[in-house]
Image (spheres, rainbow, N blue to C red):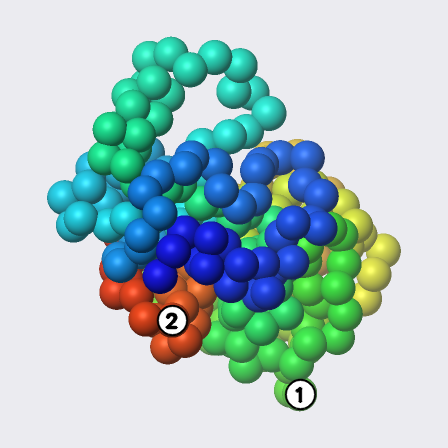
Amino acid sequence: MTRNDILDYLNTIFQYKDFTEKYSVNGLQIEGRDSINKIAFSVDTNLFTIEEAVRQKADMLISHHGLFWPNLSSITEITKKRIQLLMNSDISLVGMHLPLDKHPEIGNNVSLIKLLNGKLISEFGSVSYLAEWEEEKDLKEVSDILDTNLNTNTKCFDFSKGKAKTFGVCTGNGSSELYSLFGKQCDLFITGELRYETIGLSREYGISLMVAGHYATETLGIKQLQNRIKNNLSVETIYIEDRIDY
Ligand SMILES: [Zn+2]
């Protein structure tokens, strides 16, 4: 397959070309060779994931966190090393940030709701979803499911008397999304990481918090995307594990 075939396929899934995002570039960030036989998938783009993609002879790296962020103002030091290694190896880098968080079937947030057997209620914030369980759940039961399935150590702040029926989900850093939950009917917010001040506010609003790890919560969407590509396109795929427990 060609690089453009893959990009077209990604656009049919995510419509990323019409998606405006202020944080990152979605789609092709670095152009490598035309012919694609093997695609590597990762949560982050760093020297370790790039070296592994090179070692495993991938033609393309698709990453939730690419290399281009608002604070990138020069290509020096570690950024130079990363980009140089990709370019010398002729590997394309594709970023898929918020479209992968928000996707209604394979996205990070919906995948987490499915993992917890929740029923979708609505979207909130910019990429997050509100869901509910048929019966009220013990918070302990919920955090056990997260720990077992995401291989993580969920930190729980109980501000709803140990129970929850409605819950909001934002994988990764959910601090800014949490603000749009305040005042809504919601017992629990599940995210990857949070700023300190949001914890005190949640207590005042009576919304319990579960912080399950930025990396751990964002492995779901990229693995779903890998599966979809593996099942629908004639390319080999690999997932590069590069866990930082935060
Ligand atoms: Zn993230």
Q: Percent from the top left, x then y, of residue 151?
A: 32, 61
Residue 236 placement, left or right of 148: left
Q: Residue drawn 75% across and 64% down?
A: 123
Q: Percent from the top left, x then y, of residue 196?
A: 59, 35
* Residue 74 seen by the camera: yes
Residue 71 placement, left or right of 129: left
Q: Residue furthest bottom?
A: 134
Residue 209 placement, left or right of 149: right
For this rendering, which residue is in front, 69 or 29? 29
The mark closer to the camera, 2 or 1, is 2
**10 Å crowding of disc 1: few (<14), some (14-19), many (20+):** few
Name the residue that disc number 2 marks.
233
Amino acid on which the number 1 mark rests in the picture:
Glu
* Residue 10 seen by the camera: no
Q: Percent from the top left, x then y, of residue 102?
A: 63, 59
Q: Residue drawn 69% across and 64% down?
A: 129
Q: Residue furthest right?
A: 183
